[in-house]
Image: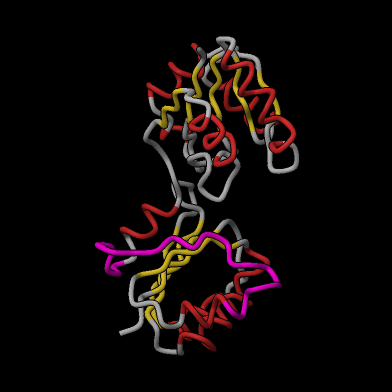
Amino acid sequence: MGKLYLVPTPIGNLEDMTLRAIKVLKEVDVVLAEDTRTSGKLLKHFEINTPLQSHHMHNEHKQIDGLVQKMKEGTTYALISDAGTPAISDPGFLLTRACVENDIEVECLPGATAFVPALVNSGLPNDRFVFEGFLPIKKGRQTRLLELAEETRTMVFYESPHKLLKTLTQFVEYFGAERPISVSRELTKLYEETIRGTASEVLEHFTDQPPKGEFVIVVGGKK
């Protein structure tokens, strides 16, 4: 019987790659990658010569049965995303579930993921929190925001630069202008920064400073 490893990769700084992750990626039979071009550069940097296979949100449904069969026959896979931990707002859940259902061993290595440092350095309560990832783009977005307006725990969101202002504007509308917010961008990279303040203050900042990079938004819960 083969095995599936879920292997986190750096979210920006290559020094965050663990020794164990490098070892696993060298030892498995195949590395499943969200984008083989992006992952190819990473593997080359760490002198990892394991074959790469594309596995992303557009083809994962079609591949599940075949991958499970290969693992039953003894093939060992490592799954990586473009950055961070697989299955956290990235492909990985479907394959992991299929392995569990077929009694195939799954092992997830600890490592980089963007929401943890953003949450911890926000200054907002992190003993209890909810991870929301990306909000629905259209259908269900308003309903979700209305539900989250009553959430008392700290909330964590991912957002892209071209949607950040829209999301912050809606947070002011649904959560209130005084709701505490922390926005981290470019985590672990050269231009990493975290902006903290009320919802209206953070919105004003990014209205004046056009958003660049990938963002993690941490929102205080309702008092």
Q: Main secondary structure of the magenta part?
A: loop
| In-front residue for pair 41/141 | 141
Q: Is residue 113 magenta?
A: no
Colouring convention used in this rendered image of the protein: secondary structure
Would you place residue 159 above or below residue 209 in this image? above
Estimate the x, y position of residue 51 in percent, counting from the top left. Answer: 65, 15
Q: Position of residue 11 (x, y in %)?
A: 50, 43
Decide if residue 112 is on the left or right side of residue 44.
Answer: left
Residue at (64% x, 73% y) in the render: 140
In the image, which residues are magenta? 123-143
Find residue 31 and report its horizontal and vertical position in percent.
Answer: 59, 22
Residue 139 on the magenta span: yes
Q: Residue at x 37, y 79 (%)?
A: 180
Which residue is at 74% across, 34% downward?
A: 62
Residue 215 x, y percent position in the rendering: 53, 60
Q: Quadrant of the C terminus?
A: bottom left
Total number of numbered discs in the rendering: 0
